[in-house]
Image (cartoon, rainbow, N blue to C red):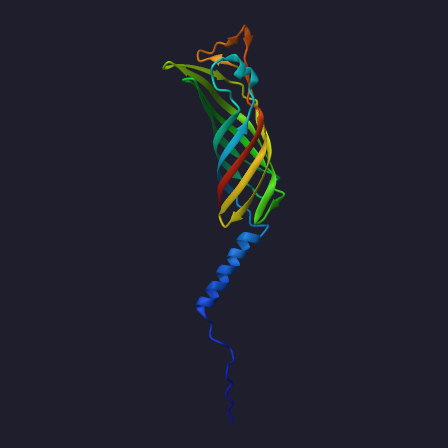
Amino acid sequence: MSSTTQSSELPLNPCRSFALCLLACVSALFSSPHAHALVELKGGYSSHTVAPSSLDGAFTGVAKINQLQSLSADIMANVPLMPVGLGLRHEMLSFKGDVGGTSSKIDWKRTSVVANKRFIDTGMYLGPIATFAMSNDFKYSITNNNVTTTYKAEAQLNGTLGIEAGIKLLLITIGVEAGYMHAPLGNLKTDAGVEYLSNGQKVDVTMSGPYYRGTLGFNF
């Protein structure tokens, strides 16, 4: 006597299996605390509140400097077992003003080392971030009657300390950063490198103040 066993298993649906696999992968990208990106590329736009009283007081008939705008690019490396992330930031800070036909502008290029520590780093991130300048190229120019005079400052020791926070959307990050920039840039000099004197006094250039940055990044 023979017996026939009939299987009660349903046939595997390829579409359903693929959907479940995709859902699991997306869930892991959003929520896994262990799946940190090794490299992050990030662009930013920021506003810096400044009050360089010595520089403003050195020239008459020009716009007062109270705010700088900045575009920046970061590259960060997050190596496993390292306590902090390390990278580089390049910023292009600027100001333009016009009073009675006399225009003035600041062009400041700043390259710095970046360090951050994310105490939360899952589907969102939060933690301190700091920069320390390696190079500065600060130029202040005044144009009157089509004649432009350019000045510069060359001190290197300046930095920022702030807090960053944001969210991760698959490989994309959207974030904000807020903090304080300590930026004493030394004495103002002519384009030929001679210290500029205003009423017999050296002009100390300081661009310290709070800043706010919005960022858009890519992780891989």
Examine the image and state in which quarter residue 80 appears. Answer: top right
Q: Position of residue 158 (x, y in %)?
A: 57, 24
Residue 51's spot in the image, x, y percent? Answer: 56, 22
**Considering only vertical position in the picture, is 86 above or below 53?**
below
Residue 198 position, x and y percent, is 52, 9
Q: Nearer the viewer, residue 3 or 103?
A: 103
Residue 195 higher or lower than 51, as above or below: above
Q: Residue at x 56, y 43 (%)?
A: 166
Instruction: Give the side of residue 149 with respect to residue 207, left or right.
Output: left
Q: How many marks?
A: 0
> Where 204 falls versus 77 (above or below)?
above
Where, by quadrant of the figure, is residue 183 drawn?
top right
Q: Nearer the viewer, residue 44 or 40?
A: 44
Say which residue appears at 49% left-offset and 42% top-offset.
Answer: 217
The residue shown at (49%, 76%) is 10
Give the residue displayed 49% in from the left and 48% down from the top: 171
Outermost residue toward the bottom in this view: 1
Which quadrant of the view contains residue 155?
A: top right
